[in-house]
Amino acid sequence: MPALVVQRYGHGKSGALLIGDMWRWQMASKNKNEDLPRAWRQIIRWLVTDVPSRVQLATEADSGAAGLGRRLIVKARNEEFKPLGFANVELSVMPNGDESQAVDLSVDPSSTEDGAFESLYIPREEGGYVARAVVRDENGKTIGDVEAGWASNPAADEFRSLQPNIALMEDLAKRTGGRVLDVSELTEWAREMPSTQSPVMDSFQTPLWHLPWMFAAALLLLVTEWWLRRRHWLP
């Protein structure tokens, strides 16, 4: 016959102690008076230790930002642990855990899950980052203040493999209007280079007097005028 039965219930778990005369344990001897209360405390603590908090903050790599971005996901629940549809979420990221350099992020509700809010952060430098989320309900009461961290090391991710990342290069080329060339296409590409217009054209202005041919033409005209005047005896 089972003595202890445990079952998952929602986001937590419930348990049933099926020993009807467990109270006799406390009556065994004077030295064991505290064993039964301690056992009950440990059982209760064991049941609630894996229960998630009402506010959770998770971080995951975002493939859409060339693998460098970090997607921050905040999940909020009410007192009944049901998704909290309306919540005021304040999300910030602290490089190296320094609050003086905290960056406030805009948060949008998730389109796939109720009670979830998302934001995207792209680290500019390598190192450790700490994200902090403060969630308040519609009455302004704070229901959760959680933190999560991760380490960013783009150089290590880049040199982890010596094989070229063709998928990443094709994605960059597609988003920037370029193309990925094979080694056999380099000669043809170099031949087409002089006649190919750049997608970005910059216009600039320069005075004509700064051009050598313009200065030479002005000097030639001046000499020609002087020669004509001398030839025809003009003043």
Image (cartoon, helix red, strand yellow):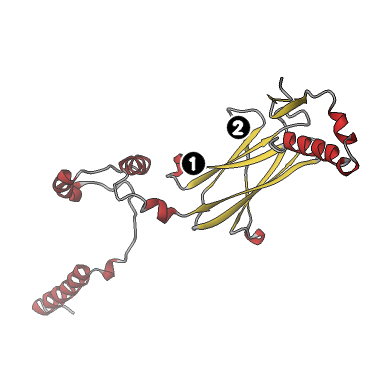
Amino acid under label 1? Asp
Is 160 on the left or on the right of 71, as rendered?
Answer: left
- 16 and 224: which is toward the camera: 16
**Residue indicated by mark 2:** 110
Q: Residue furthest left?
A: 231
Q: For the residue marked with disc 2, what is the amino acid?
A: Ser
Question: What residue do we see at 78% from left, 35% from top?
Answer: 44
The quadrant the N terminus occupies is top right
Q: Quadrant of residue 205?
A: bottom left
Nearer mark to the viewer, of 1 and 2: 1
Q: Is residue 185 above or below residue 81?
A: below
Q: Residue 31 location in percent, x, y?
A: 87, 44
For residue 62, the mark is 1
> Can you tell which quarter of the image residue 213 is in?
bottom left
- Of labels 1 and 2, earlier in sequence is 1
Vertical comparison of 22 with 63: above or below: above
145 sits to left or right of 28: left
Rendering coords of residue 231 (x, y %): 8, 77
**Can the viewer see residue 21?**
yes
